[in-house]
Image (cartoon, helix red, strand yellow):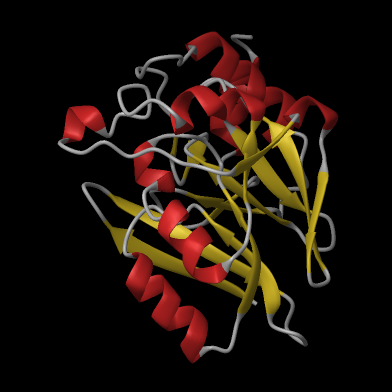
Amino acid sequence: MLLQIPVQGFFAVNAYVYADDSTMRGFLVDPGAEAERLLDIIADKNLVIERILLTHGHFDHLGAADALRKALGVPIGMALEGRAYAEDPWRNLSAQCGSAITLEDVDYFDASQRPLLTAGTCRLMAVPVPGHSPDSVLYRALDEDLAFVGDTIFRGSVGTSQFPGGDAQQLRASLVREILPLPGQTVLYSGHSEATTVAREKATLQALAARV
């Protein structure tokens, strides 16, 4: 089961549930806002969330994570480089938008090791894709052609590198190294657009490859 759930905070963002169809156990990815609504959906569909995952540490992706961690009693996972964002409202941009969001009790992982994360029978590999932010990762499913890509690539465009810690050259390299080689049918689920595929974005990715 895969649910794309648009949530609205200061910005709109896509949260995702990726769960085992038989046991309804799985992941919650990028719960940026509307914790109570997400909890209602989880309860209504009899889902058992085993782990919250963050693609990166900007507040519009992590805004509801701490409330959900407490309500569900599950860990939050993000890349080691995300600590600076989780602990600093200025770096995660929440302070600039009128709030001060931080996270506690995060399970940081070394994305360079490409850890395998499991929930129910769902398996996701964390893959580093720095550029939008130093801690950006994508979560690639090992048993089907899909990946949660955060703000690294969107339908018809690529992520921005304008925020603190962003790096345009790193972003291009990440896209060419980690996304372009994926099978064309791989569905890319992003933070701020409808789903797309590697095949649909191939011309953009190939153009970037020429610049790396």
User: How many numbered marks appear?
Assistant: 0
Is residue 180 among the parts visible in the rendering?
no
Check the image and report above or below for 83 versus 197.
above
Residue 207: x percent and y percent? 57, 21
Left or right: 111, with 194 as reference point: right
Q: Which residue is drawn at 20% across and 27% down?
A: 96
Quadrant placement of the C terminus: top right
Quadrant placement of the N terminus: bottom right
Left or right: 46, with 22 as reference point: left
Q: In which quarter of the image is residue 115?
A: top right
Check the image and report above or below for 5 versus 193.
below
Residue 202: x percent and y percent? 62, 37
Q: Residue at x 31, y 64 (%)?
A: 34
Q: Residue at x 34, y 72 (%)?
A: 36
Q: In which quarter of the image is residue 85?
A: top left
Residue 21: x percent and y percent? 73, 83
Left or right: 117, with 138 as reference point: right
Q: Nearer the viewer, residue 76 or 182?
A: 76
Residue furthest to the left in view is 98
Q: Residue at x 47, y 38 (%)?
A: 151
Residue 175: x percent and y percent? 63, 27
Is residue 82 among the parts visible in the rendering?
yes
